[in-house]
Amino acid sequence: QSVLTQPPSASGTPGQRVTISCSGSSSNIGSEGVNWYHQLPGRAPRLLIYYNNQRPSGVPDRFSGSKSGTSASLAISGLRSEDEADYYCAAWDDRLSGMLFGGGTKLTVL
Amino acid sequence: EVRLVESGGGLVQPGGSLRLSCAVSGFTLSDYYIDWVRRAPGKGLEWVGRSRSQAKGYSTDFAASVKGRFSVSRDDSRNSVYLEMNSLRTEDSAMYYCTRTDNSILKDFDYWGQGTLVTVS
């Protein structure tokens, strides 16, 4: 059972905008930056968003992140078939002195 | 080009030990944190442990599930980080990734290795 809570699944059609939520607490999301990753089948995870809303070079601007209080969200606009993957949020937890991942959200492009 | 390459995975019996290696290139290892993250079959990503930079005294932290059994060491001169795993359990079976963190800009896990598979059976 993950301390960061994500919906297990999400879906959308090509071109649509989808959002994935991540809920935590004051000891993690509430006081630390949130990162987002995705993992395609058989591949290593890839960083999409760091420190709540910063995009690494090479990540399309279709991906955006936001944070409010103890919750965060990842938005994907202009959905493409290649976006079909598992998506994870992560944040450091000050109380546990460890990095926490959400349980993951499987995104399906219909 | 930044690269991380894991090795050392394999099949081990419960209670056994294994040492994973992470060879890095393309950056100065002493300036960065290195974390280990795993993904068990059918499950999500799980953080295993962290080795901080030289500036942070090479301090470490571990997940509660592995604390006391796993340790991390690094040899900056050999550009390598090692995950020592003892008293292995079946639930430690997973793909293990090493990943880099640039703490100066709070950029966690910006580069990942391809992973090395550990099977405890």
Image: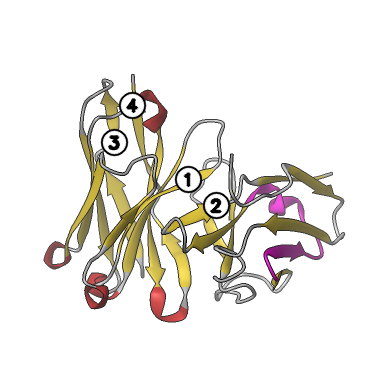
Q: CA distance from mark 2 to mark 4?
A: 21 Å
**Residue at 87% from the left image edge and 59% from the top image edge:** A16
Q: Secondary structure at mark 2?
A: strand
Check if mark 1's residue and mark 4's residue have beta carbons within 8 Å: no
Write down the residue under mark 2: A101
Q: Secondary structure at mark 1?
A: strand
Give the residues in magenta: A69-87
Indicate the position of residue A89 as horizontal and vertical percent values.
61, 57
Indicate the position of residue B32 as horizontal and vertical percent values.
31, 71
Mark drawn on residue B9: 3
Q: Nearer the viewer, residue A81 or B21?
A: B21
Mark drawn on residue B79: none
> In the rendered structure, the residue with mark 2 lies on which chain?
A
Q: CA distance from mark 2 to mark 1?
A: 6 Å
> In the rendered structure, the residue with mark 4 lies on which chain?
B
Q: Nearer the viewer, residue B19 or A72?
A: A72
Left or right for B40, reference A71: left
Write down the residue under mark 4: B89
Residue type at mark 3: give it: Gly
Q: CA distance from mark 4 to mark 3?
A: 14 Å
Q: Residues within 10 Å of mark 4 (few under 14, many from 20)?
A: some
Left or right for A63, reference B62: right
Q: Secondary structure at mark 4?
A: loop
Residue type at mark 2: give it: Phe
